[in-house]
Image (cartoon, grey):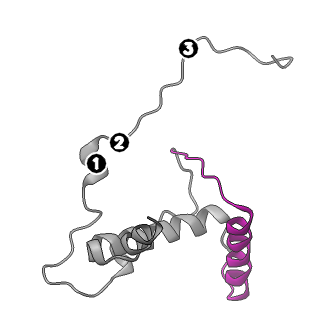
Amino acid sequence: MAHGRERRSGRRRVEVPGISELLRPAAASPVGADQFDVNLRQASGRESHSNKITVYLSSSEQLDLERAKLTLRGYGISADRGRIVRESLAVLLADLDAHGEDSLMVRRLREER
């Protein structure tokens, strides 16, 4: 134990969403909406986030993420890796909500098999 640090006696409790929260649609889409609208789902911006996940990336994936960061900087947009990941997630999940089995994510994950 590091000098000057107190030891906690209790366990940390992490709150996770229930199944109904995980499976609900992100936003109600208008009936008959066949247009993909990335604004159906908004990514969180520069704010404090209370939930955390760990994602492991290959070297090439991390390099691609850094390249995206630099590309965005060239367009005058300053975004850290977390913001890029959250925006990417919002776009993919909006596409999944809008297109279901025809979404880009479903097609790519099916190709993996």
Where residue 35 appears, as percent x and y from the top left, is 28, 88
Q: Please, what is the three-letter code of the amino acid marked with disc 2?
A: Pro
Q: Secondary structure at mark 3?
A: loop
Q: Is residue 99 above or below residue 93?
A: below
Q: Mark 1 highlights which residue?
A: 21
Compare marks 3 and 1 and give the one earlier in the sequence. 3
Q: Is-magenta flag for residue 64?
A: yes
Q: Is-magenta flag for residue 55?
A: yes
Q: Work out which quarter of the rendered image holds the C terminus and state it.
A: bottom left
| Res. 76 image quadrant | bottom right
Q: Please, what is the three-letter code of the amino acid marked with disc 3?
A: Gly
Q: Mark 2 highlights which residue?
A: 17
Which stretch is magenta? 51-77
Q: Mark 3 highlights which residue?
A: 10
Q: Could one spot residue 74 in this view of the protein?
A: yes
Where residue 47 appears, as percent x and y from the top left, is 56, 57
Q: Secondary structure at mark 1?
A: helix
Where residue 10 appears, as percent x and y from the top left, is 55, 14
Compare marks 2 and 3 and give the one earlier in the sequence. 3
| Res. 91 image quadrant | bottom left
Q: Residue furthest top?
A: 9
